[in-house]
Image (tube, rainbow, N blue to C red):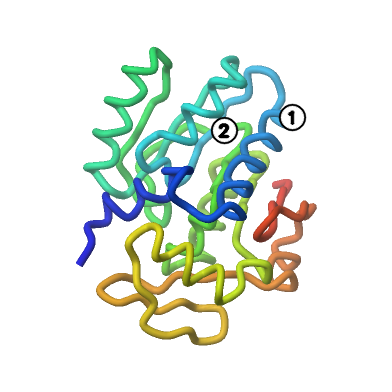
Amino acid sequence: MPSLKDVYVNCDVLENIPKPNRDNWLKEIDLLRLMLPKNARVLQVGSMDGARAIRLLEVRPDLKITGLEIEASLVELAKQKIAIAGLCVNFIHGDITNPPALPHFDYVICLNNTLGYIPEQDKSIAKMKELGKVIIISVYGEEFDNGLAQEYFKSINLKINCIKNDSFIMEDFTAIKRYSKKEVESWGGKIIKTPVGYFSIIPN
């Protein structure tokens, strides 16, 4: 069984994942670069090893970023990486479905289908809305078809046991969800199409 740390770190190794997923990862960063206001206070849900926070700060050094991550080992790795990069992010160990005491943020961002890895998705969205003025959630959609899913999950060392509608049931791991446009529309935000899914901007 792959460790959670190894799986999640692999998601950010851009040279190893399929081109559509790499393009999606970079598109999300570019959208945030363009839309986040100057000096915005940002909470990233699922900050993992800090790779996305580092990339975002490289293009938007004015942002004040806090990372919330459920895996303690990834929090420590992110702290090491951000120190090496000479940047400043406050990485916190915690679960978005039952978060620690946090301030209110201008934006709460949940990127790269992170929501699809969380079993309690409705509760996660509700908690994000409690924590931020604007919520941004990016997820995989119909463009993340079964063939691309097989290729992508193999690249991050996961193996699909079976596919049930929009749920990928993994061997020795959790189920991972992709989303229909109708489901993303139900969140009530503005939707931007991305290479493999949807980028939803939800005012609170």
Residue positioned 50% across, 64% down in the render:
116
Q: Where on the picture, by quarter, is residue 59? A: top right
* Location of residue 49 with respect to 172 vertically, above or below: above
Q: Nearer the viewer, residue 140 or 137?
A: 140
Mark 2 crowdedness (10 Å alpha carbons): few <14, some 14-19, many ≥20: many
- Please name the residue shown 34% across and 46% down the image: 9
Above or below for 185 versus 8: below
Residue on which disc 2 sits: 105
Q: Rounded to the nearest whole Å, what is the CA distance between mark 1 and mark 2? A: 18 Å
Quadrant holding the N terminus: bottom left
Amino acid at pointer 2: Phe
Mark 1 surroundings within 10 Å by alpha-carbon count, few (fewer than 14), some (14 through 19), many (20 or more): few
Q: Are marks 1 and 2 in contact (CB under 8 Å)?
A: no
Instruction: Please tell me the numbered disc located at residue 21.
Output: none
- Residue 33 falls left or right of residue 147: right
Q: Looking at the picture, how far across and down is residue 60, in whole percent? A: 61, 20
Q: Where 83 sits versus 126, above or below?
A: above
- What residue is rendered at 56% in x and 79% in y? 166
Q: Nearer the viewer, residue 17 or 84?
A: 17
Is 97 on the left-hand or right-hand side of 71? right
Where residue 99 appears, as percent x and y from the top left, is 38, 47
Write the residue at 37% across / 53% down: 98
Pick the front one: 170 or 72: 170
Q: Amino acid at mark 1?
A: Leu
186 lies above or below 99: below
